[in-house]
Image (cartoon, rainbow, N blue to C red):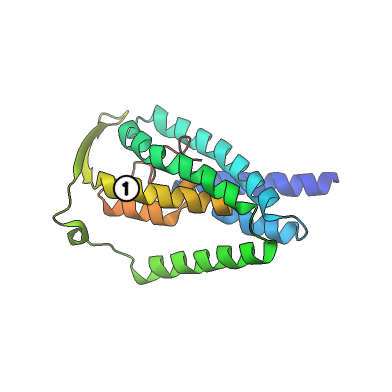
Amino acid sequence: MDIGHLALLGIIGLFVGVFGTLIGAAGGFILVPILLFLYPGESPPVITSITLTVAFFNAVSGSLSYARLRRIDYRSGISFSLAGVPAAIVGARLTGLLDRGLFQVIFGILLLVVSAYLLLRPALRRKTTAGLPHTTRQLVDSDGKAHSYSFNLPLGVTISGIVGMIGGLLGLGGGASCTCRRSLSFWNFPSMLPRQPPTSLLP
């Protein structure tokens, strides 16, 4: 591997880290397609192991930044992680059952589905969860600003499990899941809070 190739990987890593942290994701959804293009001969387990490792360190750095700002809801993050982490491990195990062709098809379909969802439903309505049990939280950040919000905890835990398995299977990382972050926005999480459980807790 020459210096030029290493420099390219460094630039890609910098972009993925900055952009992923900016939007509250670990960056797997960006890195996986890039690695599939750069390494056409590598198997899905190799690709996903690289992206999940990168996602983990990006997630840790992003979580530390949010922690300094006191903008992490630890109780909710731990609750979601209790479902998401074991599911992510199961998903990572299942990656070995996929050949590269099937992996690429599944990954591409997921990106198309999520993209279509975000485009066709730009605004989710609170009334969708009307009547469901809600958990209320209040958080005071480092600026002294209080944020009050409520969300459906059982539904969040369920979605975190699904997201964790998909993230582990495709190398996205739980934080990269647009579905999870979109749902948390829908549950009234303030926009300045991480749109996911603390990313270091959900690989």
At which x and y percent is residue 134?
19, 45
Q: How many marks?
A: 1
Residue 88: image x %, image y %? 50, 45
> In this picture, is 85 found above or below 108?
above
Residue 125 is drawn in which quadrant?
bottom left
Q: Is residue 145 visible?
A: no
What residue is shown at x 63% (from left), y 66% (from top)? Answer: 102
The answer to whether 118 appears left or right of 144 in the picture is right
- Asked whether the viewer can see residue 53, the reply is yes
Compare residues 82 and 148 and report the one nearer the observer.
82
Classify residue 138 as left or right of residue 131. right
Residue at x-position 41% and y-position 27%: 68
For residue 123, what is the image quadrant? Answer: bottom left
Q: Hey, which residue is sitting farthest left in the picture?
A: 131
Disc 1 target residue: 156
Looking at the image, residue 89 sits to the left or right of residue 14; the answer is left
* 106 on left or right of 156: right
